[in-house]
Amino acid sequence: MQITTDGWLELPIGIKHEGKLFKKVRISKSCLLDMKIATNPQYKDNGGKTLLAQLSRCIQEVDGLLPAKTSVDARIPENTKWLREMYLEDAVYIIMQRDFMSDPFEKEQGVEYTCPNCGNEDVHVLLLEDVPVYFAEDATTPNEVYNEFTLEDPVEITRGSGTVKLVSGFTMPMNLDTHIRLMSSASSEEQRSAFSVALACAKFLDSAGKEYTLTEAESNVLSNSNVMTIIQSCTVIPGVKQVITVNCSSCDEEIAQRIQVPNFLSKKESAKTVLTNLDKGMSKFAKK
Ligand SMILES: [Zn+2]
């Protein structure tokens, strides 16, 4: 991950607006207002809302879309369509860049691990430039940024008077608006789990290529192997990779370890929980 020095950065996916894609954004360092936003009780139950509020302050300019702001603390109105439709992956990338450019001394972090093979406990020093980021370089529109999957166990659902057999599908990156709605409507931890988030990103196809979205109840019958397929499909969406591979200092075993995400994502119901759950889901399935 290359950290910006002048505030300009290229988004892993980009902002979609009126059929065009805008990838170059200028951001500014953290300020006191960001801290006030992060601790505002108005946003406390929804990490997506905090993220939106942080972006509205942090983004200073979008090449071809938003002219330079007159002041770093000016806020883009939170009902701005393109802002609400920004991808979660791009949003997280911006906040990480902001935090890193705000504190030039934190260019590394200790990643603690316990080796599942030999029990060795150690700390891996992760250098900032080694944090993996995947860019959707070849995509001309965000709609092309999706990952196809084939269902090992085709699923039958009832639609109208007949049944439909779903054989494949694709996962798409989630936008902030969807994320905020998902977090607002989730009444339990299960609903905020990796499965729910993965399913919210997934569309299913029958053999004729017709598109379907599964309801919560319909998704309950998905087999474990299907769920694993969907979650894995979600993890290759562009953005900052939340999981790195560490080699055990004692036995050289490869261990999948989660990277610490920015502090603002620390609240229980925040995006961090979602990402943590997603990672837990991934590692759980990876072990099987
Ligand atoms: Zn080991």
Image (cartoon, helix red, strand yellow):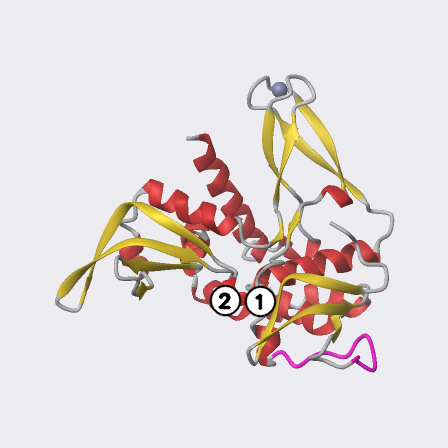
Residue 13 point in image, percent of width and height: 61, 62
Specify whether residue 93 is in view. Answer: yes
Residue at image position (52%, 71%) is 177
Query: Bounds of the magenta span?
Result: 68-78
Determine the image quadrant of residue 159. bottom left
Residue under the image location 73 percent in, 49 percent down: 1
Looking at the image, residue 98 sits to the left or right of residue 256; the answer is: right
Residue under label 2, please give it: 143
- 58 and 50: which one is in front? 58
Judging from the image, what secondary structure is the residue with disc 2 in? helix
Q: Which mark is residue 156?
A: none
For ligand 1, give the image quadrant: top right
Residue type at mark 1 is Thr
| Amino acid on which the number 2 mark rests in the picture | Asn
Q: Could you give the CA–CA distance between mark 2 and mark 1, rounded to whole angstroms?
A: 8 Å
Vertical order, 61 against 243 (above or below): below
Tell me which corner region of the image, top left, top right, bottom left or bottom right, holds residue 45: bottom right
Residue 264, position in %: x, y? Answer: 68, 58
Q: Quadrant of residue 118?
A: top right
Disc sitting over residue 140 in the figure: 1
Q: Nearer the viewer, residue 24 or 265?
A: 24
Q: Is residue 188 visible?
A: no
26 left or right, relative to 134: right
Please determine whether, in this image, residue 155 is positioned above or below residue 215: above
